[in-house]
Amino acid sequence: MITLNQPWTDYLKYGKRLFYKKKSIIFQQGEVGTGFYYIYKGTVKIISVTPGEGKRILDIVGPGVLAGEIDQSPYFSSAVCHEDCVLYYFSEQDYETLVYLHPEVTILFAQSLILKEKLLLNNINLTSTSTEYQIAHSLLYLMNSYRSKEINLTQQELSYYVGLTRVTIYKVLKKWASEGILSINKRKIYILDAIALKEKMF
C-alpha cells in the first residue's frame, strides 16, 4: 500500500469531501485526469485493463493514500470502491492553491509519485519469481493494505491481482489451507500463519 510518511490531515480543508458506496467508480481508465483523491476512509481497488492481458488489479489502497492525476493526462487505471469510502477530491486549482499556501505539499506529492513507481517496478520484478513466491508476497502485501489477516478478496480477484490463473490460485491456496497457513471462508481469505507464509518466499 502506498502510504505517505506525513499525513495530509492538515490540508484536507482545501479539498472536497466525497462519499462513495461499495463498487462505485471513482475514475475510469482513459479519462483525462483533472485532479487527485485522498482516501480518508475505506479501501479502493486500482484496476487496469489491457488488450491481451485482460483485467489486472494493480493495488488495493486504503486511508492515507493518494490516487489520480492532475496533469491533464489520461488515467492509466480505474479506481473502484472496494467498500464504502470517504474521499477528498483536489482539483488542479485546489492543488495550486494548496502549494501556494503550503509549499511543503510538493514534497509529499512527489513522495507519493515515487512510491507508485516503486510499486509498479516491484510488480514487474515479481513476474520472474516462482508462483508460490508471487502469491505469498501478494497475500503479505494485502495483509498490510487491509491492516488485518482477513483479506477481503475472492480467489478470482486474487488472480486478477497476482496475474495468475484462477486455477493456479485455487491449487496453491488449497495446498496452503491443508498446511494450516490460511483458510478460506465466505469468499474471504484468512491468514492463520503469517510466518509460514513468509517462508514460502525463500
Image (cartoon, rainbow, N blue to C red):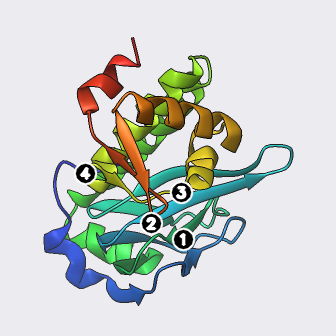
- Viewed as shown, does residue 102 lie left or right of 19? left
Residue 1: tell me if it is visible. Answer: no
Q: Which residue is mark 1?
A: 80
Closer to the camera in the image, 180 or 68: 180
- Chain-order first, disc 4 or disc 2: 4
Closer to the camera in the image, 139 or 85: 139
Q: CA distance from mark 4 to mark 2?
A: 16 Å
Q: Which residue is mark 3?
A: 154
- Amino acid type at image mark 4: Leu
Q: Which residue is mark 4?
A: 4
Closer to the camera in the image, 146 or 41: 146
118 up-or-down from 166: above or below: above
- Viewed as shown, does residue 126 lie left or right of 9? right
Q: Which of the labelled discs sits on residue 44, or is there none? A: 2
Q: Name the residue at 27% across, 32% down.
A: 194
Q: Which of the labelled discs sits on residue 30, or is there none? A: none
